[in-house]
Image (cartoon, grey):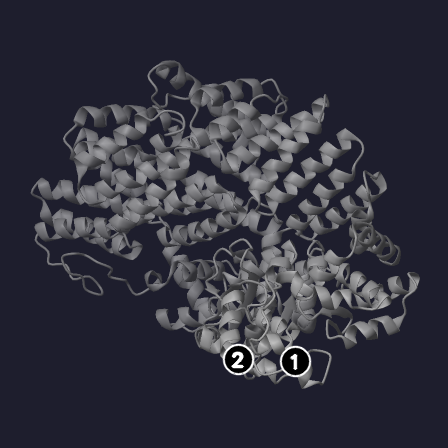
Amino acid sequence: MLFGRSAEIAAIEDVIGRARGGAGAALVLRGEAGVGKTALLDLAASRGGDMRVLRTTGVEPESDLAFAALHQLLRPVVGLLDALPEPQRDAVRGVLGLGGGASGDRFLLAAGVLSLLAEAGAESGLVCVVDDFQWVDRASADALLFAARRLGPERIAMLLAVRADAPPVKGVPSLPVTGLPEPAATELLDATALRPAPGTWDTAAGAGGTIVPGVKRALVALTGGNPLALRETVRRLGPGQLAGREPLPDPLPGGTHLFGEQVAALPGDARLVALLASVEGDLGLVLRAAGRMGAGRDALHELEATGLARIEGTSVRFRHPLIRSAVHEAATPADRREAHRVLAGEADGDRRAWHLAAATLGQDEAVAAALAETAARARDRGGYGDAATALSRAAELTPDPATRAARLKDAAVAAWLGGRPGQAESLLAEAREHAGGDAVLGMELAQLRGRFELNSGSATEAVRILAAGDSLDMLADAAEAASYAGDIAAIVEIGRRAATHPEGFLRDVLTGIGLTLSAGHAQDQGEHTHEPAHPHGAAHALLRRALARTGELTDAAGFLWATAAASYLGEADLSAELAARAGRVARVSGMVGQLPVVLEFVATAERVAGRLAESQAVSEEGLELAREAGYSNTVAAHLANLAVLAALRGEEDECRRLAQEALAIALPHRVGLRAGVAAYALAMLDLGTGRFAAAHDRFAAIVTAGPGAGHPTVVWRSTPDRIEAAVGAGDLEAAGAALEAYERWSAHAATAESRALLARCRAQVTGGHEGFEEALRLHANPYEAARTALLLGERLRRAHRPGEARPHLRAALETFQRSGAHPWARRAHGELRAAGEGWTGQSGTDENSGPAPGPELDVLTPQELRIAGLVADGLSSKEIAAQLFLSPRTVEYHLYKIYPKLGIGTRTELARLVVLRKAPVTGQDML
C-alpha cells in the first residue's frame, strides 16, 4: 500500500490513460534514494490492465556496458523484430547480439527501438518502466530518450525513475517525488510497526513496539518523510526509544548508513558474495568467482536469508541500491580490486575488460587494449557515449604518450557523435597535451578541434584552426567554416591554396568558389560589403566541371559541395535539388552525426523551391536532432529557417522570437550565414506586411554586414526581395544597383528558374510588364511564380488595365493561400478588390485572407505532406519509417488521417495529387 501519493498516482494514471487512448506519453519520476520511486513504478506496472509491461533497471556495475539495459528491456519482444523496416531491424539485432549489421548510426538504432516498442504495444498498449535511470548505460539511455520524445500516436506509456541529484532528463516532463507529509508518514510508521522485517516472519522484529506520537513527529522531521529512512530507522530502534523514554540516535543514520550494521553483521562468506554482487550482477559469474575465493552456494543462500539481496532470473539484485553502496563502502580498496580480478578471470568480452580495468593499479597496455576493443564494439553498434567512457579509461591505463593521445582523440570523436560536445572538447584538450611532437596526430587533433568549433563554437575560430592545414580535406573544412562565417577573404585564400592540389571534384569546387568571390573581394576590401562580382570564365568552367561529376558522388558531403557550386553559379533551383539529394543520401547511408547538419540545407532547399510546409517539417526534425546532438550552430540554422517560414506566414511574434533565438547563438558564435538568414527573416516579415521602407533598411544592412554577421549567399539570394523592397520604398537608385549586382552574379546561370528571377528583377527596375510575362513563362517554382504574378497584376492595375490584372492576381492569391503565405495572400486580395473583383476563393476568404485551404494537399500538416511525398516516390510504410526515424505504425497512423482529409482511399490517388502539386507551373497556368 502507498501512503500519501494521490497526486503522483493521478499523474501516472493520466500517462497510462493517454497511452491506452493512442496518445503516447512519458514521465520522469525524480526524487532522492528511498523516497518511493520504485513503489510508484510497481504501481504503474500494475495499473495498465491488459497492457503489456516491459521493465528494466539501471544497475551501477553495468552502467558502462553498452546496451545492457536494452538487452533486459527488449528481450521479451525480440520475436516482433521482423515487423520493423530492414535498416531499423538490422540495427536493433546488432545491438542485441542477434546478428544483423552494425550500422553505427545511433539515430537509426533509436528509431528501431521506438518501432519495436510500438509493435509491442500494438495490440493492447505498452507500459515501459525504467528504474534507476541514472545508472542505465548511455547507449540504452540515448535510445530510450529518443523514443520517449517521439511517442506521438503510439500506445506507449514510458515511466523513468531517476535520482534527484542526476542530470535533467531533457525533453521529458518531470514529476518531483518528495518525502511524505506528516499524516501519511505517520500511517507508514504505524504499518511498519506491524510488519515483519525483511528476511523474517517476526512482527516483533519490525518496529519492536508501539511508537508514541512525539517520536513519530520527530522521526518524520528528521528523515524528511523519506519512506525508506522511516522504515529502516524504526527497525533499528529499541522499545524505549519508540516509547520516548530513551533519546533517538543523534544523528539518525541515513543513506548507506541505514544498512551499515546489517552489512557488518553478515557472516564472512556471505559478505564476500555480497561484495562480488556489488560489482557484478550476473549470477553465474558471481557464483564462479565466489567458488574460486572459497565461498559456496550456501553463502549466497545466507545473503538471501537476510533480505538484503535476492535472485532474479540470472541476476543478483540488492533489495535497494543503498545496500549495494553500503557493501561497497564496507570493503577495503584492496578487497574490491581482488573481487574485480577474480571476476575478470571468469568473464569474457566487455565484462572482462571492465573488471580488469577496475582491478588494475597503474598503467597496463594489455588492459588498455582490451578496453579499446570494448569501445570499438560499442561504437560499431552506435553506442558512442559508452565508447567514449571506455576509451577515456583506456587512455588512463596507456603507458605510451602517443598511443594515449590517439585513444583520447578517439574518445573525443565518440563523445561528439554521442551528443556530448562538452566532454568531447575536454578529451580533445587532454589529447593535445599528450600528442608531443607527432605532426600527423597534431594535425588530426587540430582538424577535430576545428570541426567541434564549427558545430558548436566560433566559426571564425574554426577558420583560424582549420586553415593551418594543407590537405584538401582540411582545406575543405576550412572553406566550410569560412562560408559559415561569411569570411570572403578566407574563402578566396583557401580557394587559391586548393588550386595547387590535383584536379578533382572537391578541388574544382573550392577553387571555383574562391575565384568567383575574388574579384568582388578585391573591389570591396576595406568597405566590409558582400556585394558579389561577375565570376570570370575560369571560375565558371571549374564549377561546371565539378557539377558534371555529380553522377559520381555517393555521399551526402559531396552533394552538399555540389549544392554550393550550383549556388555560386547563381542557380538556386539546381542548388536546392542537389541539397534534397544530399538529404536522401544521408538518411539511408548512416551518415553518423551529420544528419542534423545536412537537414539545414535540405530545409533551405525546400523553402527555396516554394515547398514551405515541407521545409517546416524538415527544420522541426533537424532542430530536434541538433538539440539532441548538442550542435548549437545547427540549432541556430534551423531556428533561422523557421523564422523565415513564420515571416512568410505572417506570424510576426513567432518570427521575431525564432529570429532572436537564432541570432543569440549565431552572432556570438560568428556564424554569419545563419545570422544573415535570421536577418533575412525579419526583412521578409516587413516586406510581406507592406512595410517597404523598414524592409529596405533591413536588406541594406544584410548587404553591409561583415564576417560573422552576414554572408554573400544570403545577399545574392535575397536580391530579388531587396529590389522589391527598394522599389516599394521609392529608392530606384538602390534597386538599380542591386540589379546590376544580381546580373553579374547570375551571368552564367542556365536554369529556367534563375532566368525567371532575373527577368522579374529587371521588370521591377525598368518598368513595363514584358519582363514579368517572360518570367512567368520561365518559372518552375509555383511560389515564385505567384510572387511574379502579384507584381505583374499590381503594375497592370496601376496602369488602369484591371481586366488584364485580375487573372494574375487571382492565380497569385490561390497559390499564396495554398502555401499558407497569408501576408502575400492579403496583399493579392487587396489588389484584386481594387481591380474590381470581390474574390471569395474556392473555400471562401474574408478581407484578412486568413487560411483558405484548397481541395488538395494544403489541408495536410507538414509531417503528413512529407509522408505523402514519399508515398508518391513509391516508398512503402516501412521504407518511409526508416527515412523519417518513425515507426511503421506511426506512418500508417498519418496515412489513416491523410485519406479522409483529401477524400481519397488509396496510395495511388495520393501519389497523383502529390505529382500534380509538384508539376512545374507555366505562364499559361498563371492566367
Q: Which amino acid does label 2 sit on?
A: Val
**Is residue 490 visible from the viewing direction of this image?**
yes
Q: Which of 727 and 403 is in front in this view?
A: 403
Q: What residue type is labelled 1?
A: Gly
Q: In this view, does 212 lie above or below 791?
A: below
The single residue placed furthest to the front in the displayed view is: 245
Name the element at disc 1. Answer: loop
Please give the residue where the numbered disc 2 appears in the rendered image: 212
Q: Which residue is drawn at 38% across and 19% down?
A: 520
Residue 568 % position (x, y) = 43, 29
As drawn, the label of residue 206 is 1
Name the element at disc 2. Answer: loop
Q: Residue at x 35, y 51 (%)?
A: 612
Quadrant housing the N terminus: bottom right
Residue 645 % position (x, y) = 33, 48
Judged left or right of residue 536, residue 148 is right
Q: Write down the quadrant of residue 502 in the picture.
A: top right
Q: In this view, does 447 lie above or below 39?
A: above
Q: Distance between the residues labelled 1 and 2?
A: 15 Å
Q: Write down the quadrant of residue 761 in the picture.
A: top left
Q: Which of marks 1 and 2 is nearer the N terminus?
A: 1
Judged left or right of residue 236, residue 917 is left
